[in-house]
Amino acid sequence: MFRRSVPRRAWLALIPLVVGCGAHHRQNAAATTPTTSVDRAEATHASQPAPAPLPVTDPVLDLIAASEHHFEAGQSELGLGHFEAAKREFDTAVSILMESSYGGRTEPRIREHFDRLVDRISAYEVRALAEGDGFTEKQYEPASIDELLAMSATLAPPAPTAETKDTAQGDSVEHDVPIPLNQRVLAFIELFQGRLHDFIEEGMKRGSQYLPMIQNVFRAEGLPLDLAYIPLVESAFKPNALSRAQAKGVWQFMRGTATENGLRQDWYIDERSDPLKATVAAAKYLGMLVRMFDGDWHLALASYNGGPGRVQRAMKQGGLGDFWESIRSLI
């Protein structure tokens, strides 16, 4: 029977699936010579208390305090019904962090405040819109990554058949990101070409309208073009996909990561659902991740899905530097 084959470059999309941030001392000597006016002046100066040291400030805490001040001002304006003024204060609270030398999430204390700040502002925005102008929340579709991760957690990937092995080994496509044909990779190829074939095929058809644009952006940024297939698993190329974790859009950005990478999210628009703008942000984020992991795209892709902190912890705990060696700690 004829067996339909998944596009070879789409195999890269399985990488995110398999993972399913002393005091000075003075000694007084006895006077042995007559006291002069100079001596008296020096003695008077020495008897005066030393000036109090200037208070040491923590620039991180100062930055957080300034951000929180604008957030509280926004809350006050919102309570008075001044929605535009509230929006300006909320935007300033975020901008203070983003425009600092630390950025939104490079310093642990700022990252914690930043993520909490974005969540609080988001809650106010949704509530204000829902209660204000007859706003009806947009209907979102479930993100495919939730379904695929649930499936991979409950159903063991099928054993690869001889046909799958032959197909994979005979692949003549030159991949931008090398994919080792180990048992786990072959098992997911079997899954994609078997039970999930229709799902993959439907996603590829939907993605055909976005892939040229994505590849153009990645080509301009010097990124591997194979990465254009990441949304196949993350969202099946659905701009209105929303995951259980509230990641949104084709590239499944969380709010904090989206804001950090230049996507606007306010009371009027959420650019995570804009395929082009989200792709530009994804290119920026992927570039940062691969630099963080010294050019290892497997670790960078695992971080895209599971978070760089999680991957770094798994590597540190296992003492391993390779994705395939660390995979059992990552999933």
Image (spheres, grey):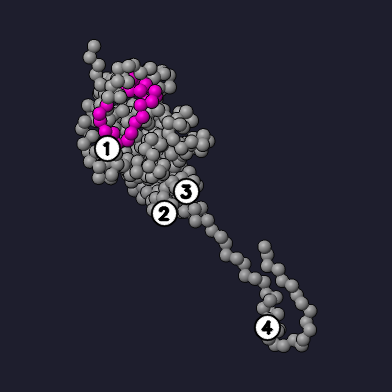
Q: What type is the residue that disc 1 sits on?
A: Leu
Give the structural element (helix, strand or loop) at label 4. Answer: helix
CB of mark 1 within 8 Å of CB of mark 2?
Answer: no
Question: Seen in the image, is 183 located left or right of residue 280?
Answer: right
If you read the primary sequence from the N terminus, does the residue marked by circle 3 or circle 2 appear first?
Answer: 2
Question: Which circle, 3 or 2, is nearer the viewer?
Answer: 3
If you read the primary sequence from the N terminus, does the residue marked by circle 1 or circle 4 appear first?
Answer: 4
Give the structural element (helix, strand or loop) at label 3. Answer: loop
If you read the primary sequence from the N terminus, does the residue marked by circle 3 or circle 1 appear first?
Answer: 3
User: Mark on residue 107?
Assistant: 3
Quadrant assignment, res 272 = top left
Q: Nearer the viewer, residue 266 or 135?
A: 266
Q: Quadrant of the C terminus?
A: top left
Q: Which residue is mark 2?
A: 100
In space, the residues marked 3 and 1 are separated at their CA atoms by 31 Å
Q: Which residue is mark 4?
A: 41
* Dot 2 alpha-carbon crowd within 10 angstroms: few under 14, some 14 to 19, many 20 or more: few
User: Mark on residue 188?
Assistant: none
If you read the primary sequence from the N terminus, does the residue marked by circle 2 or circle 4 appear first?
Answer: 4
Question: Which circle, 1 or 4, is nearer the viewer?
Answer: 1
Q: Nearer the viewer, residue 147 or 132?
A: 147
Give the structural element (helix, strand or loop) at label 1. Answer: helix
Q: Which residue is mark 1?
A: 225
In space, the residues marked 1 and 4 are separated at their CA atoms by 78 Å
Q: Residue 279 location in percent, x, y?
A: 28, 40
Q: What type is the residue that disc 2 sits on?
A: Ser
If you read the primary sequence from the N terminus, does the residue marked by circle 4 or circle 3 appear first?
Answer: 4
In space, the residues marked 4 and 3 are separated at their CA atoms by 51 Å
Q: Tell whether position 330 is magenta.
A: no
Span of residues in magenta: 171-192
Give the structural element (helix, strand or loop) at label 2. Answer: loop
